Amino acid sequence: MGSLNAAKPKDALSNSNLLFLIAVVIFVLMYGFAILRYPGSFLQFQTFFDLFNLNAPLIIITLGISIVMIGGGIDISVGAVTGLVTMCCAVMLESEMGSVGGALLLALGIGIAFGLLQGYLISYLEIQPFIITLAGMFLANGLLTTIHKDPLNVTLSGFVVLRDFEIVIPWLGTHNRLGNFIPLEIKPGAVVVWVLVIILVILMKWSRFGRNLYAVGGNSQSALMLGINVRKTKFHSYLLSGFLSGIAGFVYIMTTGAGNVGNASGFEMKAIAASIIGGTMLTGGVGNLFGSPVGSLILLTINELIRAAGVNSNYQAIVSGLLLYIFIVLQSVVVWLRGRGKFSLVLPSWLRLGRKEVEDQG
Amino acid sequence: MSMVKAKAHGSHLFLPLSVLALLIVINLIKGADYFSMSLINGALYGNIPNILFGASELVILAVGMTLVTASSRGQDISVGVAAAITSAVFVRVLQNTGDITWLTIAASFLASCVVGIVIGAFNGSLVSIFRVQPMVATLILFTAGRSIAFMIDGKLSPVLANDLTGQIGGVIPGVPIQTPIILTVLFIAFIAVLLKTTNLKLYSESVGINEKAARLNGIDPTKIKFLTYMILGVCSAVAGFIAVTKAGRHDSVNLLKFVEMDAILAVAIGGNALSGGKFSIAGSIIGAYTIEVLSRTLLRLEVGTETIKAFKAVFIIILMVVASPVVRESATKTLRWVQAKSNRGIVLETGASDAAAVSRADATEVSRADTPAEKEL
C-alpha cells in the first residue's frame, strides 16, 4: 500500500507489511515459548485477554502515535495528555455535576483541544513537531499537577458500575487451584481497543485521509506535487492522535477508577517503542496499524514473562531495550537489503512471491 | 554583501538573546537587587552565580546535542541516561580504589569518559552504520539505561561523602567561584578550541545539510556522525560527573531526569534547526541558560512548583510561534512593506540587500529540503 509500490505487482510485499509480518511471527514465537515455559499461566485465555484488559490505554495511545509517525511526525505529548484526562475526569466525577457522559465528553474535549493546538502549530506554522509536542507534554503535566495533586478515587455510583462492568464469556474459562470454574472476563476497555483498531485500519487503508497520510509521510514534497493538501493531512493526523489520547484517558480511568499524578507517565516512550516494534518507521510512510497492537503485545508479553520468571525487575527494562535493539537492527537490515534488491537471498522460497521483478533486475 | 552576512549571522542569536534580556528585565522589575552578589565563606553567591551553577550540566549536554543534531539530523534522547550510567561508573570506580585523592578522582573520571565514549559509539553505530533514526536508536538506551545504572551501583544510591568530590561539586577553598561553573567554562573553551582548530564544524554541517553531496566531496558521513555521537558521550560523562559531585550521592532513578528534553529545547531555542545542518554552539549555550533563567524567574515570581511546567510550556509555544518560518516570513513582508511606504525611492540599497538575503535564505531552504525519495523502496 506504500506510495511507491503502486507500479509493482499486487502481491509484492511492501515494507509496511513485511515489518508487520516479522512482528507477528516474533509475537507468536514469543507467546509459544511462554506457553511452553510457563504453561500454568500462559495457557489460560484470561492471561491473553488480560494483556488487553489492563493495557488498553497503552494500545490506544500506540495507535495514535503510529498514525502520527506514518505521517512523518512525532507526538510525545500523548502520555501526559492521557494522564491529564484521567485526572480531569476524576475531579469532574467527584464534583457535584459529575456524570459518566459528561466525563466522556470532557475526556474527548481535552484530547481534541490538544490535538487542535498541536496540529495547528505543527502543520500550519511549520514548527518542529518534537518541540511543540514536548511543550504539550509540559503543559499537560503542569495542568495535571495544578488541578489536583493527590490521588483521587472516584466513588460516583454510576461510574463504579461502569468500572466494575465486565463482559463474561462463560464457555471460555479456566479452573483455579480449588477446582472452581472461572469464566473469562473482558473489560469494556479491551472491546474499545478492538473496535478502534478495526476502524483505524479501515481508515488508514481505504480512506482518502489514510492514503494521503502515507504519501505525505513517504515524501511530503512529491505528495504536494500530486496535489495532496499536505498541511491539512498532517493537521488531521495530530488531531486524531489527540482524540485517541482522550479516549485512552477515559479508558484508563475506567480501568483503574482513580486519578493520579503518575497516571500514564512514561507512556509516550513505551508507545513509540511499541509502534516501532510493530513495524512503523519513524521516517514516515511505512507502517501497518495492525502492527501497533502487536508491538504493544510483544512488549507486554516480555514484561509478563519476566514477571513469571521472577527475576529482578530491573531486567525488565534491560530486556525491553535489548529487544528494541534487535528489532531496530532487523528493520534496518531488511530495508537495506530490499533497497539493494537482494532480499530474495534471505527470504525463503515460499515467501518469494511477486519478487521476480526485482530478481530480474538484480 | 558583508553587511548582509553579518546581519544573517546576528539574526541567529537575536531571538535567544532577546528572550534572555526580556527575562532579566522581568526579574529586575520584580526586584532591583537581581544582580547583587555576596561573598559567603569565600565564594560568590547570588542570582547570576546560581543560574550559572544550576545550568552547568544542561549547557554541556546542549553543546554535544548541537553537534549531534547538526550531523545526524536527529536528537539523542539518551543523554540523561548516559550521564546516569557514566556517573555510576565514576562512583563505583572511585569507591573501589580505596583512598580518595585528586589522582583517583581523575582516574575514575577518565574511566567514566571511556564508558561515555562506548555509549556514544553504541548510539553512533546504530545511527551511522545501520541508518536508524537517531531518536529511535537512542530510545533503546533510554529504555534500558537507568536499570543498567542501578545494577552498576549495586545498591540504592551510594553516597560520595568526602571533601574532595564535595569541593568539585561546591567550592574549592580560596577560589571565589563555584567549581561547576569553572568546569563548564573550561569545557566550553575546550569545545571552542576544538571547533576552531579542526574541520569538525564544517564537516558535520555539510553532512547534515546533504549527506550525498558531502560524500561526493570526500567527507565520510559515517565517520562524522560516529564522531559526533562519541563527543556527545564525553559530554554526558562530564555532565554526569558534575551532577553526581553536586548531589553528593548517586541516585540512578532521578539523576538528571528529563534533562534530554531540556537539552533538545536548548538547541531549538538557540536558533538551530532540529533537522540538522548549520549550527551555532553559542546559540545553544544561550538557550540552555535561558531555560535555567526561565525556571528560576518563574520560581522568583512565586509561581507554584506544580504550575511551573504549564507556564514553561506556554512560554516555549509562544517562543516557537514567534520564531516559526511562517510568522517570520509574514513579519519580514510587513517590515518591507512599511519600509517601502516610509522611504520609497530614497533607499534603494536596503531593498536590494534584503532581496539578496531572501534569495540566499531560499537557496539554503532548497538545499535543506532535499529528502531521500527512496524511503519506501
Image: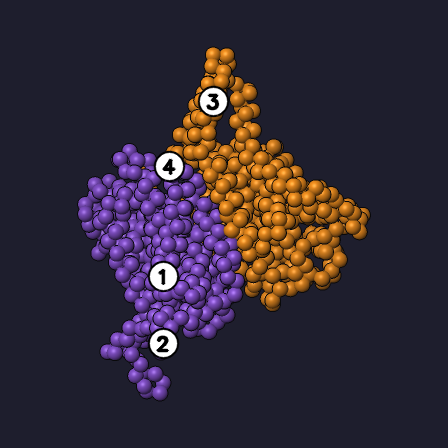
Q: Badge 4: how crowded within 10 Å, few (<14), some, or many (20+)?
A: few
- Chain B pictured colour: orange
B141 with respect to A334 (left or right): right
B180 with respect to A251 (left or right): right
Q: Which mark is residue A275?
A: none
Is tag 3's residue or tag 4's residue first in the polypeptide sequence? 3
Residue A362 coordinates in the image, percent (x, y): 26, 41
Q: Badge 2: how crowded within 10 Å, few (<14), some, or many (20+)?
A: some
Measured Cα–Cα span from mark 4 to mark 1: 46 Å
> What amino acid type is highlighted by mark number 2?
Ser
For marks 1 and 3, give the one nearer the viewer: 1
Colour convention: by chain
Residue B270 coordinates in the image, percent (x, y): 54, 38
Measured Cα–Cα span from mark 3 to mark 4: 36 Å
> What amino acid type is highlighted by mark number 3?
Val
Q: Which mark is residue B371?
A: 4
Residue B111 coordinates in the image, percent (x, y): 63, 53
Name the residue beneath numbered marker 2.
A41
Q: Residue under mark 1: which chain is it in?
A: A
Q: Residue under mark 3: which chain is it in?
A: B
> What amino acid type is highlighted by mark number 1?
Gly
For marks 2 and 3, give the one nearer the viewer: 3
Please tell me which residue lies in front, B37 or B353. B37
Q: Are marks 2 and 1 in contact (CB under 8 Å)?
A: no
For marks 4 and 1, give the one nearer the viewer: 1
Q: Are marks 2 and 1 on the same chain?
A: yes
